[in-house]
Each structure stands twice: as C-alpha cells, then as structure tokens.
Amino acid sequence: MNRAMKHLAYYAHSSMRQGNQIEVPIPYTIMGFDMPVFLSFEDIYEFINLQEISANCILVYMRYLEELCRINGQAEKFVFVSPSLISPVRTDTEDAGRRERADNLLSFLRDAPKERLYLVPHNRGRHWVLGVIDPWEDLVLYFDPLREKKRDDFTELMNMALADWKITTGEGIRRRRDCKTKFSNRPCPLQEGSVECGYFILGFMRDIVLNGIDALESGGFRVEVVVPASDADGGSVYISRSAICKYLVEFAACPPKRSFYSDGLLVGCTFIESLQQS
C-alpha cells in the first residue's frame, strides 16, 4: 500500500468509523445540477481493498477526470454523464423507467458540438460497462470488461435518446428516419474476477481521456499494481488509485466550504496539477 492509500486508510479508521463522511461536490456538468456526494467508511474500505466499487466512488473519479480535462484544455472534447441518471433501478417499470433515463441523457446531448464524446458508465445489474457516444456520427462505442454481447437495456436506452436528439437538432431530417444508431463492441482488456468491473471502467475512461479512443485496443497501458487482467491482454488495467486517494485526502482535510466554481477555478485544481504525471 503506497503512502496516499495509507493516509486515506488511516483517516478512514480514525475518523470515519463513527459515521463521519468525506463530502465531494459533484458539478452540474456531470449530474445535471450541483450536488455533493458523501463517501462512507465502507466506500473507502472497499475501494482501498479492491472490493466491489460504489457508484459514489465512480462519481468522484469522474469529477477527477473532468478536472484533468479542464487543465489539459480538453473540457470541450469530453463530457462525463453520471451513471445514476441512466442506469436502471429496481423500481423501474421497463418502459417508463427507460423513458425517463433517455430524457436524462438527452439533456446532456442537446447543443452537442461536433467531435465531442460522451462517456457514460452504465450498471446493468451488478456489472459495470462503459458507453462512449458520438452523437454527430450516430455511433455508440461499447466497452464491456466481460466481453459479453448482452446489452438490451443499454441499446434501447441509446436508441431512444439519440432518436430524440436527431429530431431536436434536425439531424433526423437530414438522415433517413429509419437509420438506426450504430453500435460497436470494442476490444478491451478482460477482467478475471467477479467484482473488478467498476475499476476497469475507471481505467477505460482514464485511458480514453489521456491517450485517445483507440488506447484500449493498442494495449499500451501504464501499469501501476492494480487490477489483474488476462495475460493475453497485456497484463493489468491501469487505474491511478494512488492519485484518487490523494484527491480524497485533500477533501477529507479541507471540506468544501465554497461554491464548486470560484473565480473560474475548480476546487482542487492546484492539487490536480501535481497529479498529472503520477
């Protein structure tokens, strides 16, 4: 365990076992509105020990990547969409729940400039997958660390949202109305265990942001003692758990007391700059 993880583990055991939580603001660019998420002792314990990751940890990592994009001048290239807005919940009736979730996704796609990509983690029921949407190409790239072909809910959700987007932007007039969205199951590393899928999705998003959409196919991963993948896929999936642990330690030490945006700067930006080479 490196120093950042030790610091976070120490804080969790000394301050969070009695019910204290780490508050991290999530901006409207990810959720559709500003709101905080609260990480519990269980969230931190499971993350450090590579157990099943919580949706809140994924949200925090998405905020971390969004800040990296802003610092690297890529804010207009990538948009991160909260999985809570588009993943099914048990209380959904199949059609009604999907309609609402498609509307949530459509709210992000409106006014999309060309060449912008939307990174959409999706939980289809105790398994995480990643969709990357290019609305102007009418294309959805699908990354599944189990490499399964089953994506019924995901496919229907994307079709509904993109069909509405084509109508609202006039693209449905330019294209044939019966032209269906293209889906591409993309090659990606294969997970070996049963609970690592969430960590793979974090690694997929990070590699796409830093190295481009084809990074997962090239096998050019940076390796940091992480999540084992099949040997045939080039070793391990890279996810900077030490970087996100440092990030969480900052929020634990200095809880946010001001607006997420202040004088044009993001809370934590100066800290993030030191992590770009981590």
Image: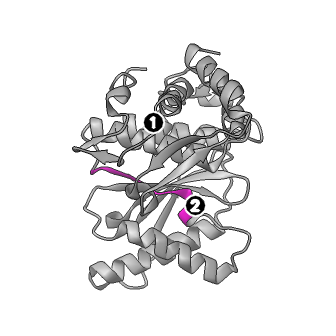
- The answer to if 80 sits in the magenta stretch is yes
User: Foreground: 234 or 61?
Assistant: 61
Cα separation, mark 1 vs mark 2, equals 22 Å
Q: Position of residue 25 (x, y in %)?
A: 46, 47
Q: Residue at x 53, y 48 (%)?
A: 59
Q: Answer above or below: position of 178 versus 60.
A: below
Quarter occupied by the N terminus: top right
Of circles 1 and 2, which is in front? Answer: 2
Q: Answer above or below: position of 266 versus 132.
A: above
Q: Which residue is mark 2?
A: 84
Q: Secondary structure at mark 2?
A: helix
Quarter occupied by the C terminus: top left
Q: Position of residue 230 (x, y in %)?
A: 68, 31
Residue type pointed to by label 1: Asp
Magenta residues, as a range?
A: 76-85
Q: Quadrant of residue 199?
A: top right
User: Foreground: 213 or 84?
Assistant: 84
Q: Which residue is mark 1?
A: 207
The numbered mark at residue 124 is none
Q: Residues within 10 Å of mark 2 (few under 14, many from 20)?
A: some
Q: Is residue 175 visible?
A: no
Please state the total of marks drawn on the protein image: 2
Q: Residue furthest right?
A: 194
Please state if 164 lies on the left or on the right of 97 as rendered: left
